[in-house]
Image: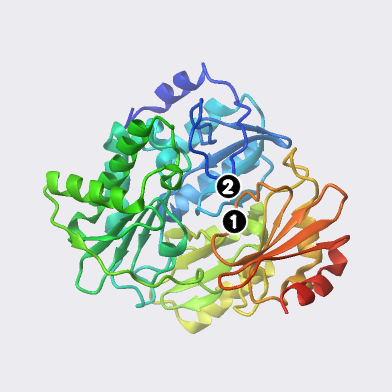
Amino acid sequence: MAGSTPGAIIGMLAAMSTASTPPSSQAAAVSRDRGDACPGALRLHAADDGALARVRLPGGVLTTRQAEALGSAALRLGDGDLHLTSRGNVQLRGLPAGCGAELAGLLEAAGLLPSPGHERVRNVVASPLSGLDGHGLRDVRPWLTGLDALLCASEAARELSGRFLFALDDGRGDVAGLGADVTVRAVPDGDALVRLGASGTALRVPGGQAARATLTAAEVFLDAARASGTRAWRVAELALPAEELTAALGRRLTADGINHATGVPEATGTGGPLPGVTGDALSVHVPLGRLSAAQWRELTRAARGELRLTPWRGVVLPAPGLTPERAADALARLRAVGLVTDPDSPWPRVGACVGRPGCARSRADVRTDAAAALDAAGLPGLPLYWSGCERRCGHPVGDRIDVVAAEDGGYRVSVTASGRAPRTATVDHPSRLATVLAAITS
């Protein structure tokens, strides 16, 4: 269906209804009797605040024209806001149940649906500052465009779940630490390390063949999932040793004529760009990932042709040649609409799921509570994530503090940190969070 016209998409959608998508499980599942129902731009999810569309943006990259189209769609059809995800994608919420065909037409006209049959599998995160600050080993944009083209041309890739994730790291280790199903990382000699799963051994391949090797790794996963009969959605759900998957990947690379060797493990980073000016780019953080129409318009005005949404709910605006005076003026305008431009702000370390009223499963309005407790949230050294229930949708990987709404109206606070025994406490009101955090992290 690559290259389908708006009319073809609308015709296809005429027979589709808004699906009540089952919630994703936060625990690894090894056997299922149904397919993946992850929402997308064409398959909407029925939430408490209306239908939800998730628009995949490989690498988080948008042209200003595409950004304007998304903003227009949010205002015309949704709640007016754009909601950033932990994969650098955008969600539109508050949509009427029958808007699927109109939304598809808007997105296709903006070039955001290059292949309707693949739109849910284009889950690709990439180092957002790649090629902009001089710290990466290479600009991963050729890998990004190459992989996206290969995905959209692959019949096999259509079988990937909407949860399967690719990560393209320029060598700095930022997105390599996000637990992707296939991770590609630049190394100093121009080669790339390709790893299938979060714990497998990486294989070194020529940098020019990295995109093809990435798709090959996904195909190895699909073969293993079919052989297991488990309908696995993620590599971690396969009941196979990591080295067995690596060996299978090596055999497929050989069959595909891609030279490879065992790679050396590389350290991963701890997060995304800090707000402010970094190299040839402006960076802002979006509190709790929710962008108003006014904020989105200001970002689009400040962009010089392109925006890059990050997996840490931020936005990078490439700005080569930007003078200090113009950078200061742009940041002042972005700050004036409520975006975070201060690198010392606590906001980049605070996240939350959508909570009430958007999610029926949530026990609390976690976004409001998180904002009210911002001063307390700035105390710990670990990221702080608020969740309305035990699913913890969108929570960061790695060390963190989880604040999970409890049935009694309070919250359960737990610390997950490597090298430390788990610690848990309860708080009956967000105003007491500072006291509990001080005790639990001491």
Q: Which mark is residue 108?
A: none
Q: Residue at x 65, y 54 (%)?
A: 290
Above or below for 277 versus 393: below
Residue 165 at x, y percent in the picture: 43, 49
Furthest toward the top, the residue is: 15
**278 or 348: nearer the viewer:** 348
Residue 226 at x, y percent in the picture: 35, 31
Q: CA distance from mark 1 to mark 2?
A: 8 Å
- In which quadrant of the rendered view does residue 288 lie? bottom right
**326 or 71: nearer the viewer:** 71
Residue 322 at x, y percent in the picture: 44, 77
Image quarter (top left, top right, bottom left or bottom right) of the N terminus = top left
What amino acid type is highlighted by mark number 2?
Gly
Q: Is residue 241 visible?
A: yes
Furthest toward the left, the residue is: 257
Q: Residue at x 51, y 16 (%)?
A: 15
Disc 1, SS: helix
Dot 2: within a 10 Å radius of its alpha carbon, few (fewer than 14), some, or many (20 or more) residues?
Answer: many
Q: Decide if residue 188 is on the left or right side of residue 237.
A: left
Above or below for 320 versus 14: below
| Mark 1 lies on residue | 297
Q: Is residue 111 visible?
A: no
Dot 1: within a 10 Å radius of its alpha carbon, few (fewer than 14), some, or many (20 or more) residues?
Answer: some
Q: Residue at x 49, y 65 (%)?
A: 316
What amino acid type is highlighted by mark number 1?
Arg
| Mark 2 lies on residue | 71
Above or below for 174 versus 114: below
**CB under 8 Å between discs 1 and 2:** yes
